[in-house]
Image: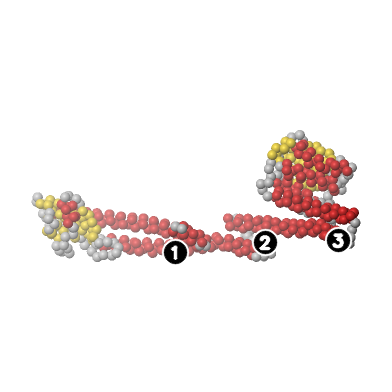
Amino acid sequence: MRPRGRLRARLRRLPVVTRLVLAVAVTMSLVLTGTAGLVYWRVKTALDQQLNDDLTTYRSSLDRAVGAGAQLPPGPSGSLRQVLDGQGRVLRSSDALRHQPLLTPAEMDAVVRGATVRRDVGSLLPITADTLRLQARRVTAEGRTRIVVAAVRRGHRDEALRELLAQLAFASALTLIAASYVGYRTARAALRPVERYRGGAAALADGSPNTRLDVPADRDDEITRLGHTLNHMLDRLAASAERERRFVADASHELRTPLTLMRAELDVALHRPRSAGELTETLRSVDTEVQRLIDLSNALLDLEELGSSGHLTRSSVHLPDLVEAAVAPHRRTAERAGRAVRVEAADTDIDADARWLRPAIGNLLDNALRHGTGTVRLTAAVHDGRLRLRVTDEGPGFPPGFLPRAFDRFARAEASRTGEGSGLGLAFVQAVAVAHGGTAHAENTGHGSAVTLDLPC
């Protein structure tokens, strides 16, 4: 892994607060460095301009004096001067310089050729003594070449810049510390509710009976909205867990009943020798219970498949053909019971998944034939892009206490669970409606029961 990749990996492992503080510190360091550099540059430019103006004025006065053969004028406090001939020999010099030349041989050659040399002697950092800024220029005096060197001391300028650097460094360090501290406190305050939510979620994961997080009701910021979202998710999880618990309990009871009956039938058959007729009757009873288990398993698998996305495939279906295909298997059952099935289906096409809608209609007819009386009526009409499919009977209707849970899994109108059916028919009908983006509704009409599907088509 490259060094940059390793650094990123290490940073990702740091706590969020630490990363935020580092981000604030790095950003403030860049801002402070840029600001300090700008201030230093402006001050240095101003000081250098003043120093250069003084040096240029002093050198000009020396040029005039040397050209006229007059006495050299005094310069600013601490200034130095030196006059050399064309071969670099010192003719006149300040007492502090004695006869030590200020120019190098290369600079002498450049000045003799007519160039103006400007140079600093000594450095700002590290601190050196006798720092100078000099200018050298060629002057003609009485037909002879003279080199005039003027220099001023940079001590005050360098001391001011060093003091400025120290103050900028001190102020930047204090500002960086203060910004990092404020960033740390702000990050901690901002993330404290998140940590509280995390602790609450951890307590819930450990089995805490409290299924909600403590979210302030008088705030409306991002963290608070996150808390409300988590509480909504926890409510959904609690409801899902309750449904799962109820489903497992109901499914266990539903599976236990046919298995117990099968075991009892087999125990009786094996208790003493049986005739061929008795054994046949026992096998038929066992076959009935096995078929009941198969039906229950298929219903549960259908509900599970329908509840997952990707198993609903809409296509254009002729509504009368769909309804007739769902009704046909139940006509013989109705005839044996001396009842009639009346169908009214609009002559139109709908966009639906016939694979699921057909058995849903069959479940409604089966319920009406099994629990109702009289004529069963099925009407299917399309209005404003919605299919309204309604199945009614002329029976006693649903018990009032059963209606709120009519579409729950394993819900039955009778108190016992020994009757026919698994209690999954209406649950399947509602699952089909929801998968299509519609609704299912059960009600009593005063002269029987009615179940209505309302689906977009």
Q: Can you say which quadrant of the picture contains the C terminus?
A: top right
Q: Is residue 291 above or below residue 358?
A: below
Closer to the camera: disc 1 or disc 3?
A: 3
Closer to the camera: disc 2 or disc 3?
A: 3
Name which of mark 1 and mark 3 comes first in the sequence. 1
Residue 431 shows in this picture:
yes
Q: CA distance from mark 2 to mark 3?
A: 52 Å
Horizontal arrangement in the rendering, residue 268 relative to residue 119 (left or right):
right
Q: CA distance from mark 2 to mark 1?
A: 42 Å
Please state which amino acid type lies under the numbered disc 3. Answer: Leu
Q: Quadrant of residue 69?
A: bottom left
**Disc 1 residue crowd, few under 14, some 14–19, many 20+, Cα 10 Å:** some
Please report the residue visible at 65 percent of the width from the left and 63 percent of the height from the top.
204
Please report the residue visible at 42 percent of the width from the left and 59 percent of the height from the top.
29
Residue annotated with mark 2 = 211
Residue annotated with mark 3 = 270
**Disc 2 residue crowd, few under 14, some 14–19, many 20+, Cα 10 Å:** some
Residue 420 image label: none
Q: Nearer the viewer, residue 68 or 18?
A: 18
Please state which amino acid type lies under the numbered disc 1. Answer: Ile
Please report the residue visible at 14 percent of the width from the left and 62 percent of the height from the top.
99
In the rendering, at what x and y percent does residue 177 appear? 44, 64
**Disc 3 residue crowd, few under 14, some 14–19, many 20+, Cα 10 Å:** few
Residue annotated with mark 1 = 177
Name which of mark 2 and mark 1 comes first in the sequence. 1
Q: CA distance from mark 1 to mark 3?
A: 89 Å
Horizontal arrangement in the rendering, residue 10 relative to residue 208 (left or right):
left
Q: Are marks 2 and 1 in contact (CB under 8 Å)?
A: no
Q: Quadrant of residue 216?
A: bottom right
Q: Are marks 2 and 3 in contact (CB under 8 Å)?
A: no
